[in-house]
Image: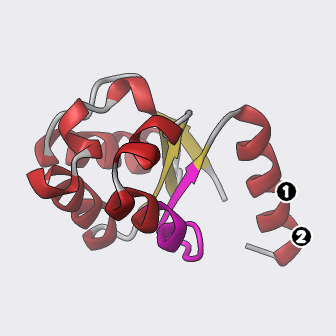
Amino acid sequence: MRTYLATAAIANDRDAVDAIAEAHYAHEADTVVVPVELLPAEFFQLSSGLAGAIVQKFVNYRMGLIVLGDVSAHEAASTSFRDWVREANRGRELRFVPDQAGLDCLHDRDLAAGA
C-alpha cells in the first residue's frame, strides 16, 4: 500500500477527484489518507449523501481511502454511521483508523499479506 496524506479539505466529490489525481499522478499512491479535520461535518451524517458521493469517486477511480482520526463521537451519535464504519473496516476500499498507530498497523498487515 502506497499512501498519500491529503493536505487540502475534501468538501465534495470534486475535491475527492483532485485528491485522487494528486495521489496517483504526483505520488504514485494507491490510497489517500484523509485526516478527519479535512472532512466537513456533513460527511459524518450519512443522510446528507456526501460521504457516499465522496467514497464513490474513490471506488470509481480504484483508489483506496483511509479516514484518519477519532470518529467515535459520530459513531455514538448515529447507529447507521457506526455500522457503516464497522462494515467499511471489513473491506479494502474504505477504512477508518483512529490514529497514526492504527495506520501503521494497517500498513504492516498489508505488507505481511503481500498487498
Q: Nearer the viewer, residue 57 or 67?
A: 67
Q: Is residue 93 above or below residue 19?
A: below
Residue 58 pos. (x, y %):
32, 61
Quadrant where the N terminus sits is bottom right
Colour logic:
secondary structure
Q: Is 93 covered by the magenta stretch? A: yes
Task: Tell me the quarter of the picture where residue 65 sits.
Answer: bottom left
Q: Mark 1 touching mark 2, by CB under 8 A?
A: yes
| Secondary structure beneath label 2 | helix
Quadrant where the C terminus sits is bottom right
Which disc number belongs to residue 22? none
Magenta residues span 85-96
Mark 1–mark 2 distance (CA, rounded to whole Å): 6 Å
Task: Tell me the quarter of the picture where residue 59 sits.
Answer: bottom left
Which disc number belongs to residue 108? 1
Residue matched to label 2: 112
Q: Is residue 56 left or right of residue 74?
A: left
Figure disc tally: 2
Residue at left 81%, top 76%?
Answer: 114
| Secondary structure beneath label 1 | helix
Q: Label 2: how many residues lie within 10 Å, few (<14), some (14-19) or many (20+)?
A: few
Residue at left 30%, top 47%?
Answer: 21
Q: Is residue 17 left or right of residue 70?
A: left
Residue 13 pos. (x, y %):
14, 48
Residue at left 29%, top 60%?
Answer: 55
Residue at left 55%, top 33%?
Answer: 69
Q: Nearer the viewer, residue 60 or 74?
A: 74
Amino acid on which disc 2 is placed: Ala
Amino acid on which disc 1 is placed: Asp
Residue 34 pos. (x, y %):
45, 37
Q: Is 7 covered by the magenta stretch? A: no
Q: Nearer the viewer, residue 101 or 45?
A: 45
